[in-house]
Image (cartoon, helix red, strand yellow):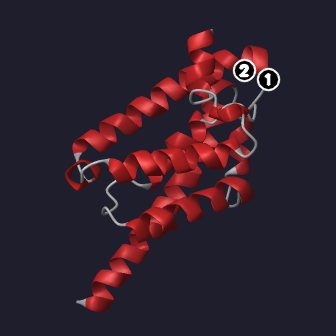
Amino acid sequence: MQVHKQIASVLGIGFLKGGGTVASIVYCIFWWLLPASYVQSFWQVAVTLLIIIIGTWSAGQVEKEWGKDSSKVVMDEVAGMAVTLLYVPHSIWYLLLGLVLFRLFDILKPFGIRNLEKIPGGMGVMADDLLSGVYAFVLVRLVIICQANYFS
C-alpha cells in the first residue's frame, strides 16, 4: 500500500496545498528537461500510457483508505499534463499554454468532464483529468496549426 501512496501522491506532492497544480508543474519541468527529439516520439506516448496505467492502479488502491478522488492523489494531474503535451513542439510557450489550459479544464470541469468523476475506482479518478488533457491538447494543437498557417 505504501508504494501506491507514493505513486498516487507523486512522492508526497499530493500532501501539499495546491498539490494538483504543483504536480502539473513538476511534470512540465520534467518534460522541458527532456531532449526535443523525445517529446515528439513514440517514447513520449509509451511513457504517457505507463503513467496512465500505473496511476489508475494506484489511485484505485489508495481510494480504500483515502476516499473517493482524494486531493492527495495527484498522479491524475501528471497523466493529464502528459496527454496535453503529446507531440507538442519543445517550446516554452506551448508548454505554458498547455499548463494553463489543462489546469483551467481540470478546475472548471466543463464539457462533460465532471461526469467522468462518477466512474468508480481508479479510472474515475483519472478519467476527468485525461479528458481535460485531451481538451487542452486539442486547443494547443489548434494554436500550433494556426501559427503555422499564419506565418507560412
- Answer few, some or many: residues within 10 Å of disc 2's Cα (few below 14, many 20 plus, some between 14 and 19): some
Labels 1 and 2 touching (C-beta < 8 A): yes
In space, the residues marked 1 and 2 are separated at their CA atoms by: 5 Å
Circle 2: element type: helix
Q: Quadrant of the C terminus?
A: bottom left
- Answer few, some or many: residues within 10 Å of disc 1's Cα (few below 14, many 20 plus, some between 14 and 19): few
Q: Position of residue 96 (x, y in %)?
A: 49, 65
**81 up-or-down from 142: above or below:** above
Q: Residue furthest right?
A: 67
**92 up-or-down from 151: above or below:** above
Q: Position of residue 147 (x, y in %)?
A: 35, 83
**Circle number at residue 63:** 2
Tell me the residue at 46%/60% (across/down). 137
Q: Amino acid at mark 2?
A: Glu
Q: Amino acid at mark 1?
A: Gly
Left or right: residue 70 versus residue 22 is right
Left or right: residue 122 versus residue 133 is right
Q: Residue furthest left?
A: 37
Q: Quadrant of residue 149?
A: bottom left
Q: Nearer the viewer, residue 59 or 134?
A: 59
Q: Nearer the viewer, residue 42 or 21?
A: 21
Left or right: residue 40 versus residue 147 is left
**Circle number at residue 109:** none
Can you identify the residue that label 1 sits on? 67
Q: Quadrant of the N terminus?
A: top right
Labels in figure, total: 2
**27 up-or-down from 149: above or below:** above
Q: Position of residue 45 (x, y in %)?
A: 32, 42
Q: Nearer the viewer, residue 8 or 16?
A: 16
Tell me the residue at 63%/36% (across/down). 74
Q: Quadrant of residue 90?
A: bottom left
